[in-house]
Amino acid sequence: QKEVEQNSGPLSVPEGAIASLNCTYSDRVSQSFFWYRQYSGKSPELIMSIYSNGDKEDGRFTAQLNKASQYVSLLIRDSQPSDSATYLCAVKLAYSGYALNFGKGTSLLVTP
Amino acid sequence: DVKVTQSSRYLVKRTGEKVFLECVQDMDHENMFWYRQDPGLGLRLIYFSYDVKMKEKGDIPEGYSVSREKKERFSLILESASTNQTSMYLCASSNQGAGTNEKLFFGSGTQLSVL
């Protein structure tokens, strides 16, 4: 079983702060990495994908990838209460075609 | 927008029943997936399919089977439902290919309770 590890949280940050979510993975040959957001009672939705080492920015979100350390992170700048959700890290496994292996998720709470 | 439709939002079944969970997508996606989501365990892959009549086992296929007779439809079958199969079941689909097409589109989920 190839592992994707996340701190379950909850991570609590004040409104306007930067939220930092972290993920490590065990399959060294993984090439594709994703962050999904899941609101309570809803299905996951993709917010970021990253394939190369370094940073990728999309609005208030920045994904960071370090393949040597097998580490992926998501930064949310200017956090809003509407960002309160569970954030799922997902890794495309080298041996399983197009399936994704998900971490258990980190619960984020943004307090007004 | 891509739509992935799961036939039931809530389902209650008895132990030993054969259960069918249906999933239909309307964007001609090659790949379809079944996950289950449990508190504290996250999303776990049961089965996936990358073509009609093709299926691959995921991490937890025991007690389940699947059917993909048409490209748009992927069914999950619980041969003899047990209480430990009480869970939220999520269907997803995606295009093949690397890069920006690797987005999973999820259905709204089926909460299955086995009594």
Image (cartoon, helix red, strand yellow):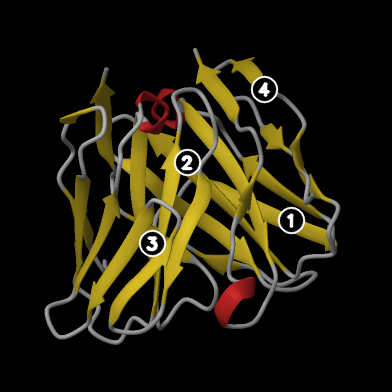
Image mark for residue B36: 2
Q: Nearer the viewer, residue A43 or A58?
A: A58
Q: Which residue is mark 4?
A: B9
Query: Can you tell which quarter of the image residue A111 is in?
Result: top left
Image mark for residue B67: 1
Q: Which residue is mark 3?
A: A101
Local secondary structure at mark 1: strand
Query: Can you tell which quarter of the image residue B72 is in?
Result: bottom right
- What chain is tagged by disc 4? B
Image mark for residue A106: none
Same-subunit check for callouts 4 and 2: yes
Amino acid marked by disc 3: Asn
User: Badge 4: few (under 14), some or many (20 or more) residues near its Cα, within 10 Å?
Assistant: some
Amino acid marked by disc 1: Ser
> Residue A108 location, x and y as percent?
26, 33
Q: Is residue B61 visible?
A: no
Left or right relative to A76: residue A37 = right
- What chain is tagged by disc 1? B
Task: Tell me how far mark 3 sits from mark 1, CA to CA.
Answer: 22 Å
User: Residue at the spot x=71%, y=35% of the render?
Assistant: B20
Label 1 near label 4: C-beta < 8 Å?
no
Eye-nearest disc, 4 or 1: 4
User: Residue at the spot x=19%, y=49% of the render?
Assistant: A20
Left or right relative to B85: residue B23 = right
Task: Tell me how far mark 4 sits from mark 2, CA to CA.
Answer: 14 Å
> Residue A39 location, x and y as percent?
45, 30
Amino acid marked by disc 4: Arg
Eye-nearest disc, 3 or 2: 3
